[in-house]
Amino acid sequence: MIRRILTGVVAAAWMVFLIPTFSSAETVEVLGVKFPRETVIEGKTLKLNGVSWLKKFGVVKVYAVGLYLENPTHDAETVISSQQIKYMRTQYLTSKATADKLQEGFVEMITTANPAALVEAHKADINTYASWLDKDMAPGLTSESIYVPGKGLTLIYQDQVKGTIPGDAFAQMYYQYNVGEKADKKIREGLLGLEK
């Protein structure tokens, strides 16, 4: 019992240390959302690698998103597989992004972007992560993902730490769907800093 309590305290302390601290007054603005050029996570300074946004039907602004890396790169494979802290911040601009739509969309996109065998092997992780997208979004609300080597991918959803999927495999699948070959072209190019 004492060990379980201590484990919980240590985990909570680590989660607090994990929350990003924005360290730069300089920002990049996308659809009215400001992304600082730097943030600090676990004592490491991450730089804004790229930004993008998603619109539906050409007019509905869904979200603006920024990707931060310790070592910025334009190479998708480096983003996907490199052992460095990675942070993605997504700020929503609509109330049409319901929990049901977000959960279904996440499962569909990560499944489409990755090999079938890999998807099957990590079905439980995919479903767990999707289950954390459990509240409707509204303008100004955020979803943040943080990858820390040796620990895994953590989701902070509407300012609440939902949990961590341990290991590297799921994290690589996650970045594959954001910047890999089958990712949304605009999102991919924006996050890689390739959009002109």
Image (tube, rainbow, N blue to C red):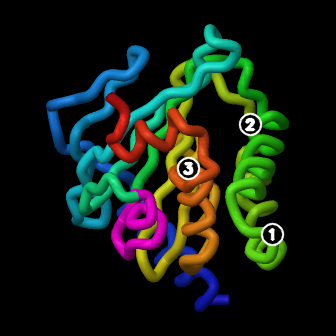
Residue with the most extreme top position: 59
Q: Is 46 displayed left or right of 126 in the figure?
A: left
Instruction: Check disc 1 and give the amino acid type.
Output: Ala
State how far apart marks 1 and 2 are (Cα). 28 Å
Badge 2: few (under 14), some or many (20 or more) residues near its Cα, within 10 Å? some
Q: Residue at x 44, y 32 (%)?
A: 52
Badge 1: few (under 14), some or many (20 or more) residues near its Cα, within 10 Å? few
Which mark sits nearer the N-terminus, 3 or 2? 2
Q: Would residue 24 be counted in the magenta stretch?
A: no
Q: Position of residue 93 (x, y in %)?
A: 56, 19
Q: Is residue 15 visible?
A: no
Q: Residue at x 37, y 33 (%)?
A: 195
Q: Would residue 85 be counted in the magenta stretch?
A: yes
Secondary structure state at the residue bearing disc 2: loop
Q: Is 50 displayed left or right of 189 in the figure?
A: left
Viewer-nearest residue: 53 or 135 = 53
State how far apart marks 3 and 2 are (Cα). 21 Å
Mark in front: 1 vs 2: 1
Instruction: Check disc 3 and give the amino acid type.
Output: Asn
Which residue matches tag 2?
A: 135
Which mark sits nearer the N-terminus, 3 or 1? 1
Q: Is residue 137 visible?
A: yes
Q: Quadrant of the C terminus?
A: top left
Q: Quadrant of the N terminus?
A: bottom right
User: 73 above or below 196?
Assistant: below
Q: Is 42 displayed left or right of 166 in the figure?
A: left
Residue 178, label in figure: 3
Which residue matches tag 1?
A: 116
| Magenta stretch, residue numbers | 76-86
Q: Position of residue 117 (x, y in %)?
A: 80, 76
Q: Residue at x 54, y 62 (%)?
A: 154
State how far apart marks 3 and 1 are (Cα). 17 Å
